[in-house]
Image (cartoon, grey):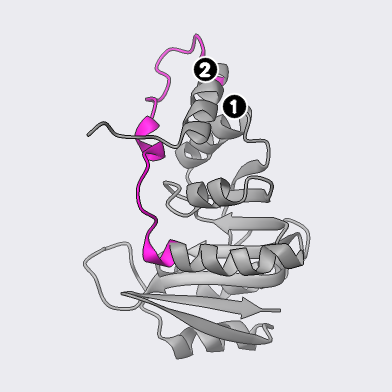
């Protein structure tokens, strides 16, 4: 069976890639495999479902996605909400460069930024929603992550983390529901709720 691609994103990526790297020796490899059609992961489906519930209320017109990585959440987000203003924050330059190709190729509502969420100094309350999916377990300074996410968000912060130990050496934390609730409530969130997803914790904190 021939592999299908998310055409609107792949076409934008190829246009942006041509704009950015035309005539440049040793340009990065064209990575069209990121845009293959695949089923969304359960944790991604859970978050998208929540967003579908709040977008019509006007509570999510702008969103900051922290640690977008390979686009496991970001690309389904862009497909589902093509008019939402989305800022993607990633510490790795090659991730940001790929997303910049999408922007340059016509996905004007995507705004890639290379920065560290622990120290990024964007203005307070810049975004309706902040998402941090599969991020917090990688970062040593969890207090700074949480405080800055709360500072940047107006309405909600959505977090997903693994719920059981695994063999990923980059996972340096394993959070319980109680750990997450304490971190976010003690730093200024009004309440938190959890969604049941196999092998993951998905938490929505409201402000």
Q: Look at the image and tell me whether residue 59 can be seen.
A: no
Callout 1 crowding tier (Cα within 10 Å): few <14, some 14–19, many ≥20: many
Disc 2 + disc 1, Cβ < 8 Å:
no
Residue labelled with disc 1: 105
Vertical side of 196 occupied by 138: above or below? above
Quarter of the image with the C terminus is bottom right
Task: Give the label on residue 73, or none.
Answer: none
Q: Secondary structure at mark 1?
A: loop
Q: Which image quarter is the N terminus in?
A: top left
Query: Relative to the observer, which residue lies in front, 59 or 200?
Result: 59
Q: Residue at point 34% right, 78% down? A: 163
> Taking 164 as reference, is 177 left or right?
right
Q: CA distance from mark 2 to mark 1?
A: 9 Å
Residue 24 position, x and y percent, is 48, 13
Q: Which residue is mark 2?
A: 18
Q: Residue furthest top?
A: 23
Q: What is the tally of numbered marks visible in this picture?
A: 2
Q: Mark 2 or 1 closer to N-term? A: 2
Query: Which stretch is magenta?
Result: 20-44
């Amino acid at each position: 069976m021939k592999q299908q691609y998310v055409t609107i994103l792949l076409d934008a990526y190829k246009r942006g890639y041509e704009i950015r790297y035309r005539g440049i020796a040793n340009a990065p490899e064209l990575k069209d495999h990121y845009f293959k059609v695949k089923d969304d992961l359960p944790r991604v489906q859970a978050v998208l479902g929540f967003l579908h519930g709040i977008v019509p209320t006007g509570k999510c017109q702008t969103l900051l996605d922290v640690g977008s990585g390979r686009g496991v959440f970001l690309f389904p987000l862009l497909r589902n909400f093509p008019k939402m203003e989305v800022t993607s924050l990633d510490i790795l330059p090659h991730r940001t460069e790929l997303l910049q190709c999408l922007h340059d190729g016509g996905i004007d509502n995507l705004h890639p930024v290379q920065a560290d969420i622990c120290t990024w100094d964007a203005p307070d309350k810049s975004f309706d929603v902040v998402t941090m999916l599969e991020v917090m377990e990688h970062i040593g300074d969890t207090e700074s992550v949480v405080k800055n996410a709360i500072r940047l968000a107006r309405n909600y912060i959505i977090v997903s983390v693994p719920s059981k130990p695994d063999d990923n050496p980059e996972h340096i934390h394993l959070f319980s529901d109680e750990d997450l609730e304490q971190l976010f409530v003690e730093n200024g969130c009004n309440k938190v709720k959890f969604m049941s997803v196999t092998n993951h914790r998905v938490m929505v904190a409201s402000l």
